[in-house]
Image: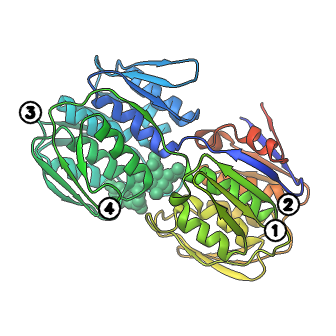
Amino acid sequence: MDKLVVECAGRLSGSVEISGAKNAALPILIGCLLAESPVKLSNVPHLMDVTTTIQLLASMGVEVMFDEHLNIEIDASNITKKEAPYELVNTMRASILVLGPLLGRFGEAKVSLPGGCAIGSRPVDIHIKGMEQMGATILVEQGYILASSNGRLKGADISMSPVTVTGTENLLMAAVLAEGTTTLRNAAREPEVTDLAEFLNKMGANITGLGTDTLVIEGVERLSGVEYSVIPDRIEAGTYLAAAAVSQSQLTVTKVNPKHLEAVLQKFEEAGAEIFCSEHEVTLDMRGRTLKPVNIRTDPYPLFPTDMQAQFLVMNALAEGCSTIEETIFENRFMHVSELIRMGADISIEGNTAHITGVKKLFGAPVMATDLRASASLILAGLVAEGETVINRVYHLDRGYELIEEKFHKLGAHIYRITD
Ligand code: EPU
């Protein structure tokens, strides 16, 4: 299994171009299942999870083609199989998103029930209940969700609690071809959900309330192919900005939407960074400044994202003073803490809260990546730790950060991969 070696290289500098958002690209790729003619997608990041999604679509008979600019053309006019097998759902939970479009367009779907994962139990009861409210019959047999409907799904008034990103996306995709009006209440407002809704509308869907917690969907008879460009990855952008913060550097992320980063940028400023935004760029300057501890509570968008929690935990571990980070979205998303403690951090966990006392220095050590964002936080720690940090299980990073070593090299970091 590949390892990443990270060495302390002092300050980073320069700019880094941000890729398309993983968590928008995955539902949009799967949303192509709803179109009766080919869709052309651009700004899709080249990531393991995207490859897995393409494999999943191909296994259903979808034709996938790449042009010379690596834009993807997806033709779902001839679906032969309406199934997401265990092997693929097991490696990528987002595969559950095929349930809505398959059921909506064909009235049947067979999808492996995802198990728990490293960051929590992550049930899909809200996805299932919502589809039942739309008239689907759902059975769970031998680890598979077997869903069917007698004719088109029927519009329904659905309230979701807690707020769920993929739950909202799945029900949105089920509802666009349903008969009548569906109202999704307490819907997730994440930019990735809005991007999916904009994509579906461009294909002919009729969704209103985009960006709010109430989405109203008037079912239409069919959707057809369009050209669409995926939004920038706000979490990738936030991760590079956090790298600048921990290493007391100045760097610019380009091709981003600063509006998607508001809650995160506010916390960077609270941590002592100077932030400059233009329409598509954000610069963070931490040169000559001292990291201040910031208290954080993760919450659904537009509040502070759980996907930036691990990165801020590293910043707090190096800040002058004490702080707390409360994780309210996933019950087990502190596994990076034990690794950071091995690198010299002073952190204790009490329930869903991490108590952090800043230390002057971290020290390189062999560490284990446990999930995508935890892995990113270990790189940040490695960038400023004395000595060498060896990160095992790098495949987590490959699922969500495009060209991570190349991008960090360009900024002056010393990171290289060892392939076994
Ligand atoms: N939940 C339920 N029942 C459900 C669905 C969710 O109880 O039917 C609970 C979950 O257990 C969790 C909470 O609701 O406690 C929120 O989970 P959500 O469904 O919003 O998470 P998700 O859709 O599975 C997406 C992202 C995650 C990101 C979360 C929160 C994708 C593919 N994944 O997950 O991204 O952390 O939303 O914003 O969009 C990552 O990129 O590293 C990542 C984990």
Give the residue at mark 2.
Answer: 385
Q: Are marks 2 and 1 in contact (CB under 8 Å)?
A: yes
Q: CA distance from mark 2 to mark 3?
A: 60 Å
Q: What residue appears at the point 43 percent right and 49 percent down from the top-left corner?
A: 192
Q: CA distance from mark 2 to mark 1?
A: 9 Å
Labelled disc at residue 188 = none
Can residue 164 be seen here? yes
Q: How many marks?
A: 4
Labelled disc at residue 344 = 1
Q: For the residues carrying marks 4 and 2, which lies nearer the camera in this image?
A: 4
Numbered disc 1: secondary structure: loop
Between 409 and 1, the residue placed more toward the observer is 409
- Of the two numbered discs 2 and 1 on the same chain, state the one appearing first in sequence: 1
Which corner quadrant holds the N terminus? Answer: top right
Q: Are marks 1 and 3 in contact (CB under 8 Å)?
A: no
Give the amino acid type for the residue marked by disc 4 in the picture: Thr
